[in-house]
Amino acid sequence: LRVGIAPRLLGGRATEVAFPDGSRAVLLGDDVTVETVDGGLLESRVKTPKRGALCQARGATLVTELPEASLTYARDGSLTYETPAGTARYDAQGITVGALRQQSRHAHHWLIAFTVLLGLLVSSKWYGVMGFGVSFTVLIALALQRWFAAGRPALWGNPRGIRIDVALVAIAFIAATVYTLSWVPDFFRQIEIKNLSDLIYRQYSMFHYHDTLKATHPYQSRWWKWPLDLRPIAYYYHDFRTNPSNSAACCVAEILSLPNPLILWAGLITVPIVGYLAWIRRNKGYTLIVLAYLLQWLPWMASPRITFEYHYYVDIPLVCICNAVALQEWWRWARTSTQSVRWVSAAGIAAYVAAVGWAFVYFYPILAAVKIPYDAWLSRMWLGRFWI
């Protein structure tokens, strides 16, 4: 979609439209120039389009026919993208998919909102910096498509059409600005942070602390244990029994940071399923979910300091999404099968959803320090010594 900031800063009057296949259109007044990735050229002032290695002239348009999609470039600076899943039209004002219309300015708003939130995330917890890894990996992968595609349209595409260089600068600059502004109160207090040099040194000292930390903890947990829900942290435990040897007496209370095991254990299956669907369908949304999941989890393999299961909690919403996608795919498949298969599938899906709800109710006492008999508490320690 249209990028208006860079041309204004650079003093130009042209509007560039970046298409998801890597092609582009440049609009300057009534003049329109469309350049395809395979060398095709379509100019509003030139009657005959220049064909590319793949695209062919068809009347006043350029058309690229691929097994996966059909792309039609028009003289008004638009691209019509047709696939078996549907048709989308890209132009300088937005994207049209069926009856839905997404304005180009919304992409800018989402980019700004994302980078502001990313800066706030890093300001509140340093390991939010992994969000930069997700962002840069996606943008770099999109850029590298031009090299690996060798003149072919990049079917993974740039889904919002934002220029990659502009997006990189926006993410780095806006997020860094927000992070720096979070230190403003320290500048006013003038205690430990008095100037910019102090602020820079504080970043070094924090990194040095975590990089050289040598410590142990009874609830520390290695990265590979987190998806298995093996070592949740007990933040509070109190035994109210006058006679601790009486296991039936009341009561004990605990706050255990235990994610719903029926959600996490299902994720061991559903996350790979969504990854598989992302690949075979070239689904950008599924790809982003799995990529964010991996890049917020696997870097902890190299952590120089002790780690805890709560470092994995940023991935739990993504696991929930993968579970929902897998259930949705199950039902879509069932709807094309026999009635008995549909009934069995509906019962299975309903049973899983009910079981997740039941697990929340069942474990709630040990999540919220509700006093329960010791036997009731012990019965909830499903994995024995791993949870105690």
Image (spheres, grey):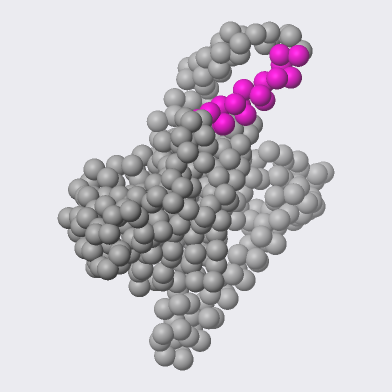
In the rendered image, residue 335, in percent from the top left (x then y), is placed at: 46, 84
The quarter in which the C terminus is drawn is top right
Q: Is residue 234 above or below residue 367?
A: above
Q: Residue at x 24, y 59 (%)?
A: 48
Residue at left offset 41%, top offset 85%: 336
**Residue range of the region highlighted in magenta in the rendering:** 172-188
Classify residue 99 as left or right of residue 134.
Answer: right
Q: Image quarter for residue 202? A: top right
Q: State left or right for residue 351 relative to residue 273.
A: right
Residue sitting at x 40%, y 86%: 337
Residue nearest the observer in this picture, 118 or 370:
118
Occupied quadrant, residue 311: top right
Which residue does the image show at 26% across and 52% down from the upper left? 41
Residue furthest toward the left?
53
| Residue 302 magenta | no
Would residue 309 be visible to someone looking at this image?
A: no
Query: Magenta residues: mostly which secondary structure?
Result: helix
